[in-house]
Image (spheres, helix red, strand yellow):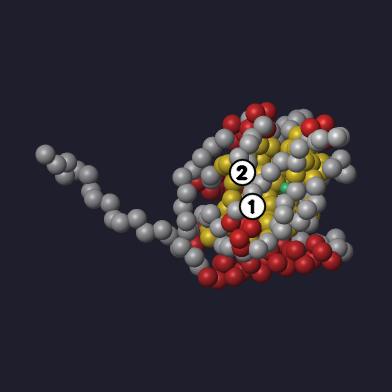
């Protein structure tokens, strides 16, 4: 017996970027930040910003087919509505609004083979462009990282990868150096050790960009640096 009320679905063809306005406009927000924001007078940040926008422009111009992934939540994503609400009231409101439009399609993940239990409840990231999609690129990764209030993201560094964060919502600090508010850009060169802490009242949402060799972007091998007390002889 057949159910003739169920129409047969057409074969699934992945949509192209230009037919996916929510993803395209989200990328345009990244483009605006890396094109029109300031480098603060720093030559390495100027070069990084150029690498990001060149790779992003090339991807948009190529109009790739999207690599759609299964949406996935993590415990920290319970804080996403508050983070977006704060973001929409602050300097990066365009980015927060564009992210809200794709929030049901985001794949939140941890990226570490070994995940400390406490951090698993308070942190996750999602990629919006990169080797794993949803917008494919082998030259650049763009994404978001979300932290619950009062989180410590342990010390780590990235081999052959340059990283910038742009604050969207909440207050945070890196290496106890300053308190960053929405609109701030923080740059970590390859090998720079960094540790992040977030304020105790609200979640913290950061946009990030990674540039580096294609092989490294495809398999960054993220590892938290061992705490000082665990190092032999320390
Ligand atoms: Fe990092």
Is 74 on the left-hand or right-hand side of 161? left
Q: Residue furthest left?
A: 1
- Residue at 64% across, 35% down: 115
The vertical placement of 177 against 122, above or below, is below
Q: Give the residue number, with chain letter if any, for mark 1.
A: 220
Q: Is residue 171 visible?
A: no
Q: Give the residue number, with chain letter if any, for mark 2.
A: 111
The vertical placement of 14 against 207, above or below, is below
**Residue 102 in the image, given as x and y percentages of width and height:** 53, 48
**Crowd band around label 2 with a 10 angstrom C-alpha radius: few (<14), some (14–19), many (20+):** some
Foreground residue among 108 and 119: 119
The vertical placement of 234 against 212, above or below, is above
| Quarter placement of the C terminus | top right
| Quarter placement of the N terminus | top left
**Residue 106 in the image, given as x and y percentages of width and height:** 53, 45
SS at mark 2 in the image: loop
Q: CA distance from mark 2 to mark 1?
A: 9 Å
Q: Residue furthest front?
A: 233
Instruction: Answer whether labels 2 and 1 touch (C-beta < 8 Å).
Output: yes
Foreground residue among 217 and 166: 217
Q: Quadrant of residue 2?
A: top left
- Residue at 79% across, 32% down: 230
């Amino acid at each position: 017996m057949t159910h003739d009320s169920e129409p047969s679905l057409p074969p699934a063809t992945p949509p192209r970027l230009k037919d996916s306005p929510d993803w395209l406009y989200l990328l345009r927000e990244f483009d605006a930040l890396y094109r029109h924001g300031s480098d603060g007078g720093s030559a390495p940040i100027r070069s990084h910003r150029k690498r990001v926008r060149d790779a992003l422009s090339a991807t948009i111009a190529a109009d790739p087919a999207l690599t759609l992934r299964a949406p996935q939540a993590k415990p920290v994503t319970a804080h996403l509505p508050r983070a977006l609400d704060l973001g929409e009231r602050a300097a990066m409101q365009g980015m927060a609004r564009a992210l809200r439009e794709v929030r049901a399609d985001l794949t939140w993940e941890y990226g570490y083979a070994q995940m400390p239990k406490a951090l698993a409840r308070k942190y996750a990231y999602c990629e919006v462009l990169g080797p794993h999609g949803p917008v494919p690129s082998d030259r650049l990764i763009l994404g978001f990282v979300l932290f619950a209030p009062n989180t410590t993201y342990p010390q780590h560094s990235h081999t052959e990868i340059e990283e910038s964060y742009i604050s969207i919502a909440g207050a945070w600090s890196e290496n106890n150096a300053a308190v960053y508010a929405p609109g701030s850009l923080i740059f970590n060169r390859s090998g720079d050790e960094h540790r992040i802490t977030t304020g105790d009242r609200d979640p913290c949402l950061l946009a990030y960009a990674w540039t580096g060799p294609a092989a490294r972007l495809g398999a960054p091998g993220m590892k938290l640096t061992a705490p000082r007390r665990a190092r032999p002889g320390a």
